[in-house]
Image (spheres, grey):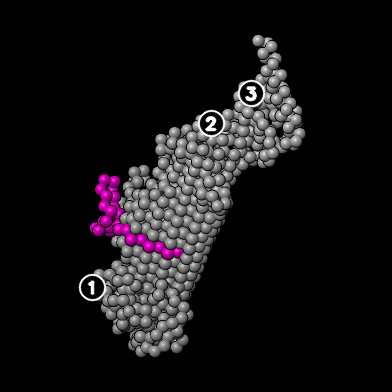
Amino acid sequence: MKGGTDMKKILVIGYLTLVICHLIFAQTLNVEVGNVTYQFSAEQTSLMPYDNGTTLTVMEKVFTLSDVTAMYVDDTKVTDSSVKVVYSDASAAITVAGNVAKDLTITSSGAHVSIVQSSDLATEITYTLSGSSSDGGFYNEGSYKATVELNNLNLTNVSAVYSGAAVHIQNSKRIKVKPLNGTTNTLVDAAGGKQKGCLYIKGHAEFAQKGTLNVTGNVKHGIKTGEYFSIKNSTIHVLSAVGDGINCEQFFLMESGTITINNVADDGLQCDIEDTTIGSTGETVDHEEEDSGNIYISGGTLTMDITGVACKGIKAEGNIAISGGEFTITTSGIGMWDTEDLETKAAACISSDANITISGGTLNLTSTGSGGKGLKCDSLLTFTGGTMTIKTTGALYYNNGTTENTNYTGNTDNIDSKYYSSPKGIKAGIKTESGSGWYVTYTYAGGIVISGGKISVSTSGRNAEGIESKSTFVINEGEVVVNAYDDGINAASDLTINGGLVYSRSTNNDGIDANGNVYIKGGIVYAIGSTSPEVAIDANTEEGKKLYISGGTIVAVGNLESGASITGGTCKQTSSWTANTWHALYNNGELAFVFKTPTKSNSGGGGYGPGGGGGSSQKLVVYTSSTPTLKSGVTAGGTEIFDGVGYYPATATGGSNVSLSNYSNSGGGGPGGW
């Protein structure tokens, strides 16, 4: 027996001697343990202790010889700090660089691979995943940053091993995810698992390189990160998800690349304020530090089709800042009754619990569901650049917790607003009410400030306002075009137009409306209201507020609010004008603005066709800084504005003079529409 053991030792020693001799002339020692191959560069190996015929130590990695299935040398070049996993249906081959071998504990079951990094690891490892498996997964755990490369990986987890995610990175550090250039990678998670996402990363996820990643989330989210998510160059397609398409905490940052999200049951992209657990109490509180819950997008392409009930395309618990990129977002889900907040909630293409700032980009937002909105924020919306086009077609949504009506047509004047959600193009700011009876007071916060770019809004559902501020509303520059069922532009408090190009038309209410004062100090304003008692421009005179006009160029189809203060220029009117006709407005003989009148009369109060409203039953009011004159039937030209119903700067030829009289300031103007 002893002699047999000695003979085995001699054979092993002889084999190792042969291997070492080969290393003198070759590059790499390969040690195979099952499906794992450890590769040691000859330049790095030195003394390899051999203990009593049972273990061999290479670069501090201890091998039990009874586990070793093969050892050989070849000319393979070893890339330090690398691990390669090649999937082949029901199995996976793993190759490990020798310099990190001692720091990794590797286990596998079929094509399910687990790699746990030692807490002593102090170098970044790059894990390259390739191949295909119909029942496999990758699990990695550690406390040092890492890179995960996807090289034409096709991985489906069926058995719910290691939580059930296709790729699960249990590491709170920075993780770079690289779909390699030109590759297409597909991940599908296990329907019976407990995973938070098909691709789950506990820490910071940084997506880079120009490859493609397709994701299907069968349990919850498509991609879930416990901390921030950033993307540059990569293409990500969330094909479907039971929860959100992408869900992250801290912040979301997109500089370039492509994201498409379809067939999700919740929000497309959601960024939450990070939760923090307090000491031994285990209490969880909101982590309100900077960059928590915020979304930043400066480039790239985002396309989303969201169908879930009351779901959002882009949703942030913090702020949203957009400075570039191309967005095409559609929501079609109806509203819902929130059993916790005891109020209705509705879908929105973009939604923030705080502020939204847009300074660039091209945004196309469409909401078709009952009560749906294009853009919503609970604080301040600041728009300084870019182009945003919003269309909503949904009906009025009603739900009191027991009764639901997705096309409510009744009177809402005496219904608590928490029971219904009106479709709107844009809704921003907060208006809170306190007290009761004669002692009711209102507090306003946030609101809307527009100082550049172009916004175009169209709404057609009942009670659908174009742009609504629950606080103040200021327009300094830029172009605003609104065609709405209800008020075109509405402010719960004061509304101020200092400049810019503003077109606002309502088919069933006021063109421009405020529950406070309205101040028009500059710019070009073209407002079209429905028939009396609705007006073109309305202020809340019932509560002592007023319309103040002190500058700019104004065309109003319909009356102005009764008691308006008009200074700094001259206001004229005519009751005889021709519908669907180009008119030229002159200021002291100089062409100021060319516009097209609404397409048909609205004398019966039944609404308008596309592109207009009003007609000979309404006044046409004009205001300029000096003396206004008007021509009808002109041939118009110049720079097109207001989506084809205006020119500025403009040219005009031909036409005939329209008789104008001094404006009578006594008519029109119902309540502010709130």
Instruction: Give the image location of residue 41, x and y in percent.
Output: 71, 36
Few, some or many residues within 10 Å of mark 2 (<14, 14–19, 20+): many
Q: CA distance from mark 2 to mark 1?
A: 76 Å
Say whether disc 2 or disc 1 marks the residue closer to the N-terminus.
2
Check residue 403 for magenta coloring.
yes
Query: Of the residues shown, which amino acid type is indicated by label 1?
Result: Gly
Query: Of the residues shown, which amino acid type is indicated by label 2?
Result: Ser
Q: Residue at x 53, y 38 (%)?
A: 87
Q: Quadrant of residue 528?
A: bottom left
Reading the image, the residue beneath label 2 is 108
**Residue 158 versus residue 502: which sits nearer the camera?**
158
User: Main structural element of the magenta stretch: helix, strand or loop?
Assistant: loop
Check the image and report above or below for 353 versus 628: above
Q: Residue at x 73, y 33 (%)?
A: 23
Specify the quadrant that holds the N terminus.
Answer: top right
Q: Residue 604 — which label? A: 1
Question: In terms of secondary structure, where does tag 2 sit?
Answer: strand
Q: CA distance from mark 3 to mark 1?
A: 93 Å
Check residue 640 for magenta coloring.
no
Q: Which residues are magenta?
A: 388-417
Res 417 seen here: no
Please indicate whether residue 447 sits to the left or right of residue 403 in the image.
Answer: right
Q: CB of mark 3 within 8 Å of CB of mark 1? A: no
Question: In terms of secondary structure, where does tag 1 sit?
Answer: loop
Q: Residue 64 — which label? A: 3
Say whether disc 3 or disc 1 marks the residue closer to the N-terminus.
3
Q: Residue 270 — which label? A: none
Q: CB of mark 3 within 8 Å of CB of mark 2? A: no
Say whether disc 3 or disc 2 marks the residue closer to the N-terminus.
3
Query: Of the residues shown, which amino acid type is indicated by label 3?
Result: Thr
Q: How many marks?
A: 3
Res 641 seen here: yes
